[in-house]
Amino acid sequence: MDELGEDKLEAGEKEAIDSAIKDLEEVMKGDDKEAIEEKTKTLAEASGKMAERLYAQNSADTGAAEAGAPGAEQESAPGQADDDVVDAEFEEVKDNKN
């Protein structure tokens, strides 16, 4: 979270994740498997929401940059043939000359 910068996090998001981390660390000192699983799930949900949002945001930013980038390679449309590609079948013939 530190490397993302505060401007990328929504209000209260950092606090919720930090709190979930502290809760999990505290529960891990004991032997209660169910409590550990519950706190792990809470942390995964809190950080997962942030990750989904950042991934979607990054994909949108990257897609816009790539779409307008000069010299960017464009993918061939479906059904459009590439002139350098040869689709062929072959059969290996072994010469039994000794």
Image: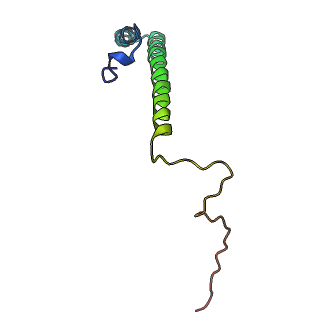
- Whether 94 is drawn above or below 81: the answer is below
Across the whole image, how many numbered discs are drawn on residues? 0
Question: Residue 29 appears in which quarter of the rendering?
Answer: top left
- Whether 76 is drawn above or below 96: the answer is above
Q: Residue at x 36, y 8 (%)?
A: 15
- Quadrant in which the C terminus appears: bottom right
- Whether 24 is drawn above or below 73: the answer is above
Which one is in front, 77 or 6? 77
Question: Residue 91 appears in which quarter of the rendering?
Answer: bottom right
Q: Residue furthest bottom?
A: 98
Q: Residue at x 50, y 25 (%)?
A: 56
Specify whether 70 is left or right of 5: right
Which one is in front, 90 or 60? 60
Position in image of residue 77 (x %, y %): 64, 48
Q: Residue furthest left?
A: 2
Position in image of residue 96 (x %, y %): 63, 87
- Quadrant in which the N terminus appears: top left
Position in image of residue 82 (x %, y %): 61, 59
Which one is in front, 47 or 11? 11
Q: Residue at x 65, y 64 (%)?
A: 87
